[in-house]
Image (cartoon, helix red, strand yellow):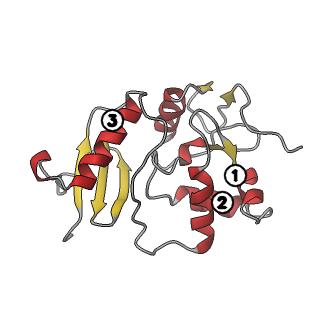
Amino acid sequence: MGDVHSAHLAETRAGPVTVWVSPAGVRRIEFGALPREDHTDPPDAWPHILRTAVGQLEEYFDRSRRTFDLPLDFSDTLTDFQRDVYDRLLAIEYGHVASYGQIAREVGKPDMARAVGQAVGANPLPIVVPCHRVVASDRSLTGFAGGLRTKVALLKLEGIDVDGTKPTSKVHPEVIPLDL
């Protein structure tokens, strides 16, 4: 993979997390156990950006960080629509959620809530680009690439109460802004 480096955080509230970086920034964050054929770099070989990314994620999991200050490397693979959606996700504050429909309206595509869902599902940088903070308009969880248990763990870490780990489980209290 050339200049791509990775670190594996095995003990997080969201389960195992692997962070991949390039010289341009954080490139990918993955949930779950690392496949045997993959490996991570030893900490003494980590470039500065990987060390910084891991440190900020550890602070997030320790509840001492609410926002991230990291360069992000999307490697020019995003459409303008995805970029708009991810920019909107970055604006969702810690401890709050937004709906797919709300995001669609805010990026100027009010009839594209499903497309927002697809963009959110394709997010290569969960946690940092907080796709876990997106729920259905009825406050139900719907899905999450890292699994619903991980989504619930991340929401609860941020102080959002969730009544289960099923797609129909709801966040409480209602923290989705109302259209006025």
Locate residue 157 relative to residue 7 in the image: left or right. right
Up the image or down, 48 lies above or below 10; here it is: below
Front-most of residues 159 and 35: 159
Q: Earlier in the sequence, mark 1 or mark 2?
A: 1
Which SS class for mark 1?
helix
Locate residue 94 relative to residue 110 in the image: left or right. left
Which SS class for mark 3?
helix
Q: Earlier in the sequence, mark 3 or mark 1?
A: 3
| Dots 1, 2 in contact, CB < 8 A | yes
Residue 58, labelled with which disc? 3
Residue 47, labelled with which disc? none
Front-most of residues 122 and 142: 122
Q: CA distance from mark 3 to mark 1?
A: 28 Å
Kind of residue at badge 1: Tyr
Which residue corresponds to the image point at 14% horizontal and 46% vertical from the top-left?
43
Q: CA distance from mark 2 to mark 3?
A: 29 Å
Which residue corresponds to the image point at 29% horizontal and 56% vertical from the top-left?
20
Kind of residue at badge 3: Glu
Which callout, 3 or 1, points to the residue nearer the camera? 3
Q: Residues within 10 Å of mark 1 (few under 14, many from 20)?
A: many
Q: Earlier in the sequence, mark 2 or mark 3?
A: 3
Question: Residue 66: x percent and y percent?
Answer: 48, 36
Is residue 34 at least partly visible in the picture? no
Question: Residue 82: x percent and y percent?
Answer: 58, 66
**Residue carrying label 2:** 116
Q: Quadrant of residue 113?
A: bottom right
**Residue carrying label 1:** 100
Q: Residues within 10 Å of mark 3 (few under 14, many from 20)?
A: some
Which callout, 2 or 3, points to the residue nearer the camera? 3
